Image: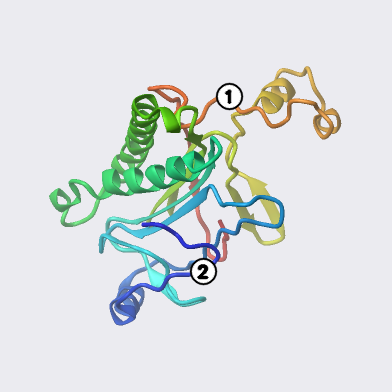
Amino acid sequence: MTQPPPSVENLADATEAEATAATSPIRVRLFARTDVGQVREHNEDNFLVADLSRKSRGLLEANRPTGIGPHGALFAVCDGMGGAAAGEVASQMAVDIIYERMVDGLDGFPAGIERDDVARRLVRAIEMAGFRIFSEAKSDRSRRGMGTTVTGAALVDDHLFLGQVGDSRGYILRGNRLVQVTRDQSLVNQLIEAGQLTEEEAETFEHNNIILQALGTSDTVQVDLTYVQLRKGDTL
């Protein structure tokens, strides 16, 4: 699915979504948008919003609540890189592959899926996306060097699992407090954690845009997995 920024797509069947929202114990409001901004000429980013129970991708109308079915929901943001068309190819491949891997085999769990299974499937889906993007870049010279970060979030009931490669951040807004719940896989963050750089020094650090890994730069990636138990009113 190509997201045509900055437009918002509607799910085809709003009535079905409303019925799910009425029976689900968890109701969410979803919104996603990506924009090229005022500096760059083309957009290399992509996002994913999916209802795994109904095997559907897309967005509801703005501010329409929807329920979370027994197989959960899936969200992702991908920051592509590589120049020309390669960055957007990598980020599009990432959201497509992650979605395909997450819905594959769900028919074997008609009553729903266990939380641990959701977490494992998310990690494997991201790993597969990295392998496939790397293989594509290796086989097509015009796409050499393409890659993308990814932060994917799988939600089942009130349990949120985040899988990350790169430095696209995930935050939870709870009340008046905004908390970063992912860990940047970047050189600057590595130096901060090692005590070799302060937060203040990081603001002007010469290499603060270097990330330690991305999907497509290697045939394997180390996915950082984070778990958050959501509360009513939380914003991701």
Mark sitting earlier along the chain (2/1):
2
Q: Residue 135: percent from the left, percent from the top? A: 34, 27
Q: Residue 206: percent from the left, percent from the top? A: 79, 26
Crowding near pointer 1: few (<14 within 10 Å), some, many (20+)?
some
Which circle, 2 or 1, is nearer the viewer?
Answer: 2
Element class at badge 2 = loop
100 left or right of 67? Answer: left
Element class at badge 1 = loop
Q: Residue at x 36, y 59 (%)?
A: 50
Q: Quadrant of the N terminus?
A: bottom left
Give, as a three-letter code, the residue at label 2: Ser
Q: Is residue 158 visible?
A: no
The residue identified by callout 2 is 7
Residue 211 drawn above or below residue 1: above
Residue 110 drawn above or below residue 30: above
Q: Residue at x 37, y 30 (%)?
A: 140
Residue 196 drawn above or below residue 104: above
Camera-side residue of 74 and 214: 214
The residue identified by callout 1 is 212
Crowding near pointer 2: few (<14 within 10 Å), some, many (20+)?
few
Residue 136 drawn above or below residue 101: above
Camera-side residue of 155 and 8: 8
> Rounded to the nearest whole Å, what is the CA distance between mark 2 and mark 1?
32 Å
